[in-house]
């Protein structure tokens, strides 16, 4: 062991990076040699490490200063002192492994502190440096350093709207840095600090319980823009491979060839077939049948025969014995109000006869006091031994089951095995499993750490998947990818990007980073209801991701028979027509109800796009304009999608259509055998208003060579330039 003079900086280095510590300046810095960029804290000597300790007034954060540095076997071992210069029983070891700095907490004794803050200063990127941060909240959020509004995000690993992958990224001056960790007791802290005319991002970490390490990997220079999501995605993809999280469709298909039916399938969900409302005192307030099982089957048949929709994941909730979110885990028999077991089994057969996947919605995390199986032995316990309360839903106050016990509940003969043998769905959905953050249980009969909670949720997923063939759950996390076939909630929530987070308030832009890592492994949908007249931004978001939409708030009973929904919505005064994809004037779905117009228009674009790209990654996601509202997606097989989220038209170039002018919410999708556009011009034809067309080769040849092309027309002018002439297509036509 070599001890160093506290007045002199000490460094370790290899051909990629150099890491230095200065006890005299309480400073650290990390040089990325390939990018010629330095990360680190060298300015004011302020604390970049802090510990939380129990003191007489209670738990308090104590800032620490670098006290001494020693070199041991090529690593640096640093000790830290409090404000009075007293050693604090904490050492941190820094090692270089390839292009990464690995950081290890080494307390002298367990329990010396309850939490450690690392890199509270130094991992920074300023607006002047073109700074950005990528945080993987749902699909991903890119946050710029530039901005007048400070913010402070505390993002727990795998929490509801925490980070859905155990990583974060920073960009500045053309350099890319990736932070990774392997313990769910790590919290990512990201803030924007505004001081006068200077704004910068600051990234740090809080480690508790078992969390003892993390890594900072210098990825060198990114693309010329300095915001290389692609470089970050490639690097994290390598880590996901090593962790076993990446199981592509090519592997899943070997055991489950039916997963191919998810490619291009939209998600149609009837949430509350039976809605029984119970108050917190377990007093029933109302019972409402929104759809009988016969009506559910009629909806599927309407989608198939009237809308001519192919590729549907048809999802039914509220089928259980007492209705949606009531008296779980006692789910069978199917409720008699909607048609009972025979009615539900018949519904399943009729949906499947349409060529659709039939899925049932269940929940084994929530338990209710009025359930016949109620017993506190199943429940997750808080520190004081009390049952852990969940939300208050239709069935009243819910309590969490322990994840270990949830598996036992699901395996009971009267639960999932009976559903399979009675109803025969194609796949199964268990709500909340992936949505809530990792839990702890303090019941001495089945204690759980966060890591063990994740494990038992994986066990539940595997059991259900083996029983039914395919499985999905709410939201999704990276650790769930190998154990599931679809996620519901990552792509969108209630017609917004997030449930609670507001990216526009942070100046951020949602990016499909999750799909840059896992797109060829899992189907992803949004969740919850929305107004289709407000969905244009989400439609182009799904175009940019190449993901199909979710249709979760159809009207009750036979919704298309309601005459009040047949009229076109009013046109707006401004440039943004948020209802544009509900329109069908001169188009295929003219005269249909609002939901049918919206479903037909969007699925004709998104279904083929997803089917063409389901087994590919997103290789690049580029912002074309300075405001980051016009963006281009490049898929691994060469398919491209350009979307315009700005308030002005934007001209792009198409190999088949020449100059194409995209209106607000316009898009252009180009593949060899498929083209879709919402545009103001195409093929030399300029339109008075926006038009929606798709062109699909039906003979396997590229469109430019195909002798059999199907043209779908959604709305607007019916004239389409085609091979030197004009064809008029009102609904659809072979050309």
Image (spheres, helix red, strand yellow):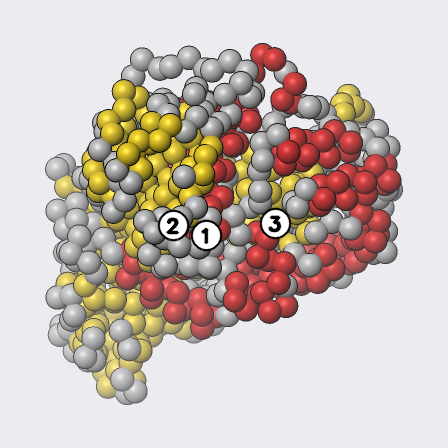
Question: What kind of element bears circle 1?
Answer: loop
> With respect to residue 462, does 628 lie above or below?
above
- Is residue 325 left or right of 259 when viewed as pictured? right
Name the element at disc 2.
loop
Q: Position of residue 526 (x, y in %)?
A: 51, 41
Q: Residues within 10 Å of mark 1 (few under 14, many from 20)?
A: few
Q: Which residue is mark 1?
A: 699
- The crowding category of the residue bearing disc 3, from other C-alpha atoms within 10 Å (few below 14, some 14 to 19, many at least 20), is many
Residue 544 location (% of width, % of height):
37, 44
Q: Secondary structure at mark 3?
A: strand
**Cα–Cα gap, marks 2 and 1:** 7 Å
Callout 2: 10 Å neighbours few (<14), some, many (20+)?
A: some
For the residues carrying marks 1 and 3, which lies nearer the camera in this image? 1
Q: Is residue 446 left or right of residue 242?
A: right
> Which of the numbered marks, if any, corresponds to residue 510?
none
Mark 2 vs mark 3, CA separation in Å: 40 Å
- Asked if residue 295 shows in the view, the reply is yes
Residue plotted at (44% across, 66% down) = 240
Locate the N terminus by quadrant: bottom left
Q: Indicate the quadrant containing the C terminus: top left, top right, bottom left or bottom right.
A: top left
Q: Which residue is found at the position 14% from the left and 36% from the top?
A: 196
Of residue 195 and residue 454, the one placed in the foreground of this image is 454
Q: Which mark is residue 473?
A: 3
Task: Pick whichever of labels 2 and 1 is earlier in the sequence.
Answer: 1
> Which of disc 3 and disc 1 is earlier in sequence?
3
Vertical comparison of 206 with 196: above or below = below
Which numbered circle lies on residue 706? 2
462, above or below 706, in the image: below
To which quarter of the image does residue 83 belong? bottom left
Confirm or deny contact between disc 2 and disc 1 (CB under 8 A).
Answer: yes
């Amino acid at each position: 062991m070599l001890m160093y003079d506290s007045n002199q900086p000490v460094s370790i280095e290899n051909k990629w990076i150099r890491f230095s510590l200065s006890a005299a300046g309480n400073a650290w810095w990390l040089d990325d040699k390939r990018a010629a960029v330095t990360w680190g804290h060298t300015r004011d000597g302020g604390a970049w490490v802090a510990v939380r300790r129990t003191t007489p007034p209670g738990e308090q954060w104590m800032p620490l200063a670098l006290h001494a540095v020693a070199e041991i076997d090529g690593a640096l071992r640093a000790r830290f002192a409090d404000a009075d210069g007293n050693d604090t029983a904490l050492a941190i070891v820094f090692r270089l492994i390839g292009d990464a700095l690995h950081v290890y907490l080494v307390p002298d004794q367990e329990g010396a502190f309850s939490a450690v803050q690392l890199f509270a200063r130094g991992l920074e990127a300023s607006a002047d440096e073109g700074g950005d941060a990528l945080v993987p909240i749902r699909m991903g959020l890119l946050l710029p350093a530039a901005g007048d509004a400070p913010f402070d995000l505390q993002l727990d690993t795998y929490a509801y709207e925490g980070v859905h992958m155990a990583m974060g990224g920073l960009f500045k001056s053309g350099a890319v840095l990736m932070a990774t960790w392997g313990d769910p007791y790590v919290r990512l802290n990201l803030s924007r600090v505004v001081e006068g005319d200077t704004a910068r991002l600051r990234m740090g970490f809080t480690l508790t319980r078992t969390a003892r390490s993390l890594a900072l990997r210098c990825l060198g220079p990114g693309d010329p823009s300095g915001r290389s999501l692609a470089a970050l995605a490639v690097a994290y993809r390598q880590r996901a491979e090593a962790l076993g999280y990446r199981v592509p469709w090519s592997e899943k298909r070997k055991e489950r060839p039916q997963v191919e039916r998810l490619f291009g399938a939209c998600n149609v969900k009837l949430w509350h077939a039976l809605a029984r409302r119970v108050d917190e005192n377990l007093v029933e307030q109302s019972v409402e049948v929104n759809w009988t099982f016969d009506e559910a089957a009629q909806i599927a048949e309407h989608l198939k025969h009237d809308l001519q929709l192919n590729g549907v994941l048809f999802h039914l909730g509220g089928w259980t014995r007492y209705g949606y979110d009531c008296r779980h885990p006692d789910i069978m028999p199917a409720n008699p109000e909607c048609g009972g077991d025979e009615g539900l089994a018949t519904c399943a057969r009729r949906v499947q006869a349409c060529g659709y996947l039939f899925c049932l919605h269940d929940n084994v995390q929530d338990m209710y006091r009025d359930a016949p199986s109620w017993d506190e032995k199943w429940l997750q316990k808080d520190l004081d031994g009390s049952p852990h309360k969940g939300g208050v839903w239709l069935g009243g106050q819910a309590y969490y089951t322990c994840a270990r016990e949830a598996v036992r509940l699901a395996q009971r003969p009267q639960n999932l095995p009976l559903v399979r043998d009675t109803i025969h769905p194609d796949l199964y959905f268990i709500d909340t499993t992936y949505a809530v953050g990792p839990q702890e249980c303090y019941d001495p009969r089945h204690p759980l750490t966060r890591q063990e909670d994740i494990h038992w949720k994986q066990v539940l997923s595997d059991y259900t998947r083996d029983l039914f063939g395919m499985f999905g759950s709410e939201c999704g996390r990276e650790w769930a990818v190998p154990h599931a076939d679809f996620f519901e909630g990552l792509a969108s929530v209630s017609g917004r990007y997030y449930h609670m987070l507001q990216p526009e308030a942070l100046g951020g832009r949602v990016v499909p980073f999750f799909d840059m890592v896992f797109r060829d492994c899992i189907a992803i949908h949004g969740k919850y209801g929305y107004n289709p007249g407000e969905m244009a931004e989400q439609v182009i978001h799904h175009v940019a991701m190449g993901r199909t939409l979710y249709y979760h708030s159809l009207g009750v009973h036979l919704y298309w028979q309601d005459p009040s929904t047949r009229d076109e919505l009013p046109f707006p005064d401004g440039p943004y027509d948020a209802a544009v994809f509900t329109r069908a004037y001169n188009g295929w779905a003219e005269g249909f109800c609002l939901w049918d117009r919206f479903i037909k228009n969007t699925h004709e674009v998104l279904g083929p796009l997803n089917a063409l790209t389901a087994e590919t990654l997103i290789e690049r996601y580029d912002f074309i304009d300075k405001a980051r509202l016009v963006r281009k997606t490049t898929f691994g097989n060469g398919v491209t999608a350009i979307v315009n989220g700005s308030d002005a038209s934007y001209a792009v170039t198409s190999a088949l259509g020449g100059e194409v002018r995209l209106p607000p919410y316009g898009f252009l999708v180009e593949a060899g055998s498929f083209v879709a556009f919402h545009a103001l011009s195409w093929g030399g034809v300029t339109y008075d208003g926006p038009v929606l067309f798709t062109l699909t080769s039906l003979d396997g040849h590229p469109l430019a060579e195909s002798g059999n092309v199907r043209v779908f027309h959604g709305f607007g002018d019916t004239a389409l330039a085609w091979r030197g002439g004009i064809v008029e297509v009102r609904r659809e036509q072979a050309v």
